[in-house]
Amino acid sequence: MSGLLGALLPAVPLVAGLVGLLLPPAPRHPGGAESGDRARMLAVALGVTGAAGALALAVALLVTVDSPTETSTTWIDLGGLTVTLGVRLDGAAALVAVAVTAVALAVQVYSIGYLRRGPHDDIDVDHRYPPYAAQISLFTAAMLLVVVAGDLVMLLVGWEVMGLCSYLLIAHDRRLPGAPAAAMKAFLVTRVGDVGFLLGIALLGVSAGSFRIADVLAHDHSGATLTAAGLLLLAGVAGKSAQFPLHTWLPDAMAGPTPISALIHAATMVAAGVYAVTRLYPLFTAAPVTLTVLGVIGSITLLLGALAATAQDDLKRVLAWSTVSQLGYMTGALAVGSPSAALFHLLTHAAFKALLFLAAGAVIHAVGSTLMSEMGGLRRSMPVTFWCTVVGLGALVGVPPLAGFWSKEGVLAVAESAAREGTGPAPSWVGWLVWVAGLVGVAITAWYAGRLLLRAFFGEPRLPLVRPHDPPAVMRWPVLLLAVPAALLGLAGFVGAFANRLRFATVPVAGAEDGLVHIGPGLLLPLVLLLVGAGLVWLGWRRDTAADPAAALGPLRPVFARAFRLDDVQHTLVVRPIRALARAARTGDESVVDGAVEGSGRVASGLGAGLAALHRAALPRAAAGVLAGALLIGLAATLIGVTR
């Protein structure tokens, strides 16, 4: 029964997406309004039904799966190298599937109102809704395939389909000049990592003689194979989960529709990398070098994202950089030996980050701008959105007893244990690095979250002509419902059944997996740092409520706003050389390859023209030619006879 549910889980949204792609886009012209409404209604029905069906299956899977289960059948056998079709299910997979489908359903419902033509819109913003809804369904199906896949090749298929869907959805609103470029950047940057991911999978499959995950985990790989494969897989994880140095695509992806930002940041793309590491975690613990690299990358990403968020004016980019930072906590937890803590924070992050993006969408929908410098005073006119944002930001910062507090404390506790007691699989200095970076990140997160709240919802309105209001019910209810897990999901860590589902019996790390929730004196230091960060931004804002607290950053503000100019570094070290190489290759192709081909053609044409001219000669000249030829033949015959 569990195997059937696992197979149906990605199949339901996949079918909804494929059928949705057959629907015609709603026509732009007014005469086609009736047929456009029918196409839109069908797209809405398919999208919502597919997501709701997947959620029901995920909940059923959560109830029925009480122990690891696997079903598979051989698909391809290439000289002893086996590729299988099947699912690999456990409690962690069921919980992640519930989170993915719940966010996908919220996004599908929310999009009905967010992508609807308003009374003041001079063009139809909704004419491409059918492919939009279908692509969300395909995106959801791809992530669910990654969640339940029992074979690395199947996992890779879902992994790559997500990349394609992200490209299509980020570029959905092609009227925005930055959307196509952002989509292309996301696609290319993640492809760089995916090359390593593909090679890592190939290396493990060839070594084990099978791509089935159970076979790969059970095989006795050599140390060199594990290290090489682990580092290659981490390249793909860095791309998908926006880890340094392949993180640059995620903030630019904010050019896409806000509901898509919620889907990418909360439940699909960025979660896939962290989840993939947990699925193969025993291989990483057997190669500690890979976890050392992951710890360094995660710590850099954590601080980089937090610092960049402090100087952004775009509301969505603040949330995007906060996602980069929170992903650093997850990869840091993996590096110090606790996939349970990483998945716990992944689940709570899915709830509060989806809430924050959808609440931000409500603000953008009402104000007509993504810039916080054009907001202000919204708590009075948008009370529902305000309080939901407070819950989301509180969970992001780690205000007790909201969800993010318990999961983030879990990460910090295992990092402290790895640092002080050496309980992690990586060297103890990695634990110190993750722990210190995490503590500093708490204070910085409190600062930029407080700045966002003060700039957007407090003070005086900066656009007095705008009359903002809370969103309509179809957008409001998803936000309200997401506020519940954002506030309470962390308390599930006290429930044994929930905690046991996130435990990994195959993880050979002593002392790091002793529980999801940690209560003790260690809670005080993060709370003090939280109060310091929040207090500093509050004091800076109180001096001048019209000024931006980011002004206190001084000369560092433009550096943080440009994220330490790492985009420029990549452009200089990677983009420009590749473009120069492409120009050289084009010149060589046109001058050498095409030149040789075209030159030989010109020689042949010239020779043919000369022969044609001779062929068309007048009769006297032709007769002279025949006589000359006969004379030459006779002379040759004579000479041959003399020589004999």
Image (cartoon, helix red, strand yellow):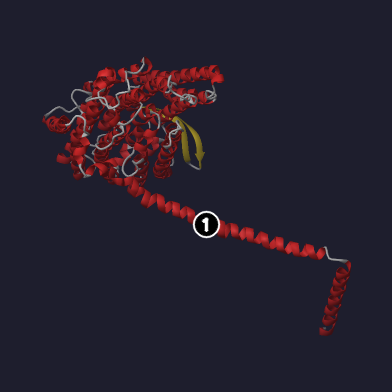
In this view, 551 is above or below 452? below
Residue 499 in view of the camera: no
Q: Nearer the viewer, residue 387 or 547?
A: 547
Relative to 464, 139 lies left or right: right
Q: Quadrant of residue 486?
A: top left
| x, y percent for residue 489 | 26, 22
Residue beneath disc 1: 587
Extreme residue in the top direction = 473
Give the residue type at disc 1: Thr
Extreme residue in the front direction = 465
> Element under label 1?
helix
Quarter of the image that includes the C terminus: bottom right
Q: Quadrant of residue 182?
A: top left
Q: Quadrant of residue 240?
A: top left
| x, y percent for residue 306 | 25, 37
Relative to 539, 97 lies left or right: right
Residue 389 in view of the camera: yes
